[in-house]
Amino acid sequence: VQLQAYGGGLVQAGGSLRLSCAASGRSFGLYSVGWFRQAPGMEREFVAAISRSGGITSYADSVKGRVTISRDNAKSTASLQMNSLKSEDTAVYYCAVTVYSGVANYMDLLKYSYWGQGTQVTVSS
């Protein structure tokens, strides 16, 4: 599976961005999808994940209530709608896929097999 994340950019605090992740291949529906982010000098951290069918979602506490993850298996895409952005949301955002299920696995970046190249999100205060 090849993944391409896009949709990042520069936005003012309080604004919104919608990130997308496009997957190649026909097996997208076999994977759960996660979004992670990495700020300069920081470790990559979990943001959100969605199960294969889209019926289960999980969010990091830092983004809960501001971020919504979704997917369209027919189009092999996943999205991350981010609202009320804060300066601390500034990071490179990555999408990834995993064959594992369950919230504990979603949050573990080592469980993800394939990663997109990342898209930069910069929030100005």
Image (tube, grey):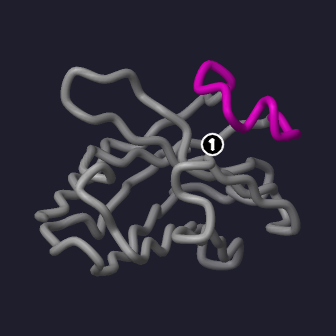
Whether residue 31 sits left or right of residue 53 in the image: it is: left
Q: In the image shown, does 14 or 22 lie closer to the viewer?
A: 14
Q: Position of residue 105 (x, y in %)?
A: 78, 30
Q: Amino acid at mark 1?
A: Val
Q: Residues within 10 Å of mark 1 (few under 14, many from 20)?
A: many
Segment colored magenta: 100-111
Q: In the image shown, does 82 or 119 lie closer to the viewer?
A: 82
Whether residue 21 sits left or right of residue 4 in the image: it is: right
Q: What residue is drawn where x is 42% and y is 77%? A: 83
* Residue receiving disc 1: 97
Q: Position of residue 20 (x, y in %)?
A: 43, 68
Residue 63 appears in the picture as rendered: yes
Classify the position of the C terminus by image quarter.
bottom left
Q: What residue is drawn where x is 61% and y is 52%? A: 48
Splitting the image into 4 quarters, where does residue 50 fall? bottom right
- Compared to residue 50, the image places residue 102 above or below, namely above
- Compared to residue 118, the image places residue 84 above or below, namely below
Q: What residue is drawn where x is 86% and y is 40%? A: 101
Classify the position of the N terminus by image quarter.
top right
Residue 109: within the magenta?
yes
Residue 56: within the magenta?
no
